Every structure is written in C-alpha cells, then in structure tokens.
Image (cartoon, rainbow, N blue to C red):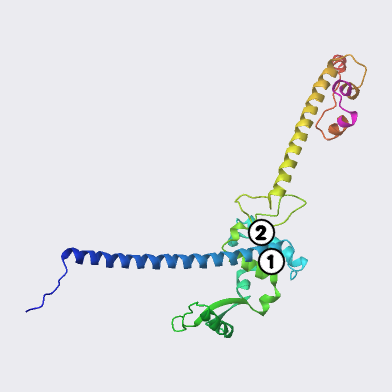
C-alpha cells in the first residue's frame, strides 16, 4: 500500500512562518540593544576621561600642579581669561606676543605625536585565561577577536617640558570645556577655579554661595540704613536753615536726628551732604547787594 505523506496545513505553515519571523525580529532587537549598551559604555568611559582631564586643568589653574611654576600658572590663567573674554572663540583672542608664541595652535600641534598601539592579549592576560576558564567563564578565542592596532596621541619631548601648553591643548580639545567656570569663585577669600554644574554658576560651591548671599544682604541693609540716615540729615538741614537757633548746623542736626558729628563730617567730605547756609543770611546779603 502506498505510504501516506503528512503534509502540513496552511494554518500550520502560517504559524511556523510567524514564529520564524518573530525569532528573527527578537535577534535583531537583541543585537540593537547590545550595540546601544556598548556605545553607552564607550561614551561613559570617554566622559569619565574627559572629566578627569578637566579636573587636572582646574587643579593647574589653582596652582596645585607641582610641575607648574608660578610663571606657568600665571600664563595659563592669563590664557583662560583671554579665552573667556573672546567668548571662548580662539579666532577672537587677543593675546600678548609672548602668549601667541607659546600658545598658538601651530605650536600646540607640534607638542603631540601620533603612534600606533597594539590591540591584543598581553602576556599578563594570557596567564589569567586558565583561571577564568576554570571558574566557568567563557573566554573568546583570538580568532574571534583578532588583534590589531589603533592610533594614540602622546606628548613628545618638547611637549613634556611645557606642561602649561599641554593643559591648554587638553582644554581646547576637551568636549566638556564649556563646564569650566567663567572665572574664579566670586568669594574673595576663595578665588578658586571650578567645574560648573549650572550655566551661570559664579561660586564654586554652596558654602561660598551662602556666604556671598549673606554678605549681599548685609551690604544691602547697610546701604538702606545709610540712605535713611542721609535723608534724615537733609531734612534736619532744611529745618536748621529756617530756624532761629544759634547752634551751628552740625550740632542742630545731631541733636534732632541723633547722628554723630563725625558721621556728618564724613559724608560732607564724601560730597554726599552739602554744607547748609541760613536763609536769613542769604536774604540779608541779597538786600545789601
């Protein structure tokens, strides 16, 4: 008897096709997610390196780099201040002849050299592989990860001697250079350069910011109190001009307002107060004329 062929129905073929397509889509999505994670890790690693380089530049600006002399620190600060005044545009910078000679882009380019560095397992890594395999960790074969080389940049002999120029190069090529503060901390007793957390940040931290805010409030209170005292003194001066008292104006104003003669003398010398004259004397002198 002829054997029967078990042919699949159209619904079964459709289900198999859908399952196969779903598996392909799942694999594609998994590959995309893996690629995104790898790119994120690379981006994070680069961001950490850029952050460390920026921290080194800030340390150099604050004079904490032992390889920089006081003249080097002054030159580095002068360059950054000129860079800030030019809206951080190297084409608009107006530097001195000495700084142009030292920090020109042509000279900075000559302080670095490109080299090929190998990609592959080092002898130290080869010794670790048996331990990893013994722990059940899969190690890819060298055929799966072929070795090669990549370009790397490092300072040459001339660049190694000029640390300030290397700091300028690291600053201009750092993607995080916009986070460098626009100037030192505005608190006079601090005066340190810092990395900004906000666009218009003017103080290095919350401690200095609170001190600056407190000092600003105290300054405003003193200005308001001084303005109020000067207003009282001017009003008392007008009263003295119209009065018949024999006291001089300072004694009169001091008696009426409680302000000291020293205060009045100080602000007359500062030209914030005018020396008043009796109206009776002014009228009599005009009649005599």
Q: Earlier in the sequence, mark 1 or mark 2?
A: 2
Tell me if residue 282 can be seen.
no
Residues 163 and 265: in front is 163
Instruction: Give me the residue at 61% from left, 63% from top.
Output: 51
**Position in image of residue 72 (x %, y %):** 73, 67
Q: Which mark is residue 194?
A: none
User: In the rendered view, does 94 fall on the left or right side of 69?
Assistant: left
Please give the range of residues in magenta: 253-263
Tell me if residue 242 can be seen.
yes
**Position in image of residue 173 (x %, y %):** 58, 66
Asked which quadrant contains residue 74, the reply is bottom right
Q: Name the residue at the right extreme.
A: 246
- The answer to whether residue 77 is above or below residue 137 is above
Instruction: Give me the residue at 90% from left, 28% from top.
Output: 261
Between the residue at mark 1 and the residue at mark 2, the CA separation in whole angstroms equals 10 Å
- Which residue is the site of mark 2? 82
Instruction: Give the quarter of the figure containing the N terminus.
Output: bottom left
Type of secondary structure dominating the magenta stretch: helix
Instruction: Give the quarter of the figure containing the C terminus.
Output: top right
User: In the rendered view, does 144 fall on the left or right side of 237?
Assistant: left
Residues 10 and 221: in front is 10
- Which residue is the site of mark 1? 99
- The answer to whether residue 55 is above or below residue 269 is below
User: In the rendered view, does 144 fall on the left or right side of 55?
Assistant: left
Residues 4 and 106: in front is 4
Label 1 neighbour load within 10 Å: few <14, some 14-19, many 20+: some
């Amino acid at each position: 008897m002829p054997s029967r062929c078990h042919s699949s129905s159209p619904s079964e073929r459709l289900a198999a096709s859908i399952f196969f397509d779903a598996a392909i889509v799942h694999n594609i999505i998994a590959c995309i997610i893996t690629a995104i994670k790898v790119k994120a890790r690379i981006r994070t690693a680069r961001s950490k390196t850029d952050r460390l380089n920026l921290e080194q530049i800030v340390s150099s600006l604050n004079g904490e780099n032992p390889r920089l002399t006081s003249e080097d620190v002054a030159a580095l600060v002068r360059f950054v201040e000129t860079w800030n005044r030019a809206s951080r545009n190297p084409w608009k910078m107006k530097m001195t002849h000495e700084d142009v000679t030292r920090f020109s882009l042509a000279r900075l380019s000559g302080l670095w050299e490109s080299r090929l560095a190998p990609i592959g397992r080092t002898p130290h890594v080869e010794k670790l592989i048996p331990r990893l395999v013994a722990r059940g960790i899969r190690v890819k074969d060298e055929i799966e990860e072929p070795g090669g080389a990549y370009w790397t940049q490092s300072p040459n002999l001339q660049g190694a001697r000029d640390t300030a120029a290397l700091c300028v190069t690291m600053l201009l090529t750092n993607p995080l250079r916009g986070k460098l503060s626009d100037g030192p901390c505005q608190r006079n007793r601090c005066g340190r350069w810092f990395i900004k957390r906000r666009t218009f940040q003017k103080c290095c931290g919350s401690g200095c910011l609170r001190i600056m805010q407190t000092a600003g409030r105290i300054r405003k209170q003193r200005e308001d109190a001084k303005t109020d005292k000067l207003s009282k003194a001017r009003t008392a001066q007008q009263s003295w001009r119209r009065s018949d008292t024999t006291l001089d104006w300072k004694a009169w104003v001091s008696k009426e307002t409680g302000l000291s003669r020293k205060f009045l003398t100080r602000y007359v010398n500062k030209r914030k107060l005018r020396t008043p004259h009796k109206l009776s004397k002014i009228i009599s002198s005009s009649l005599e004329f």
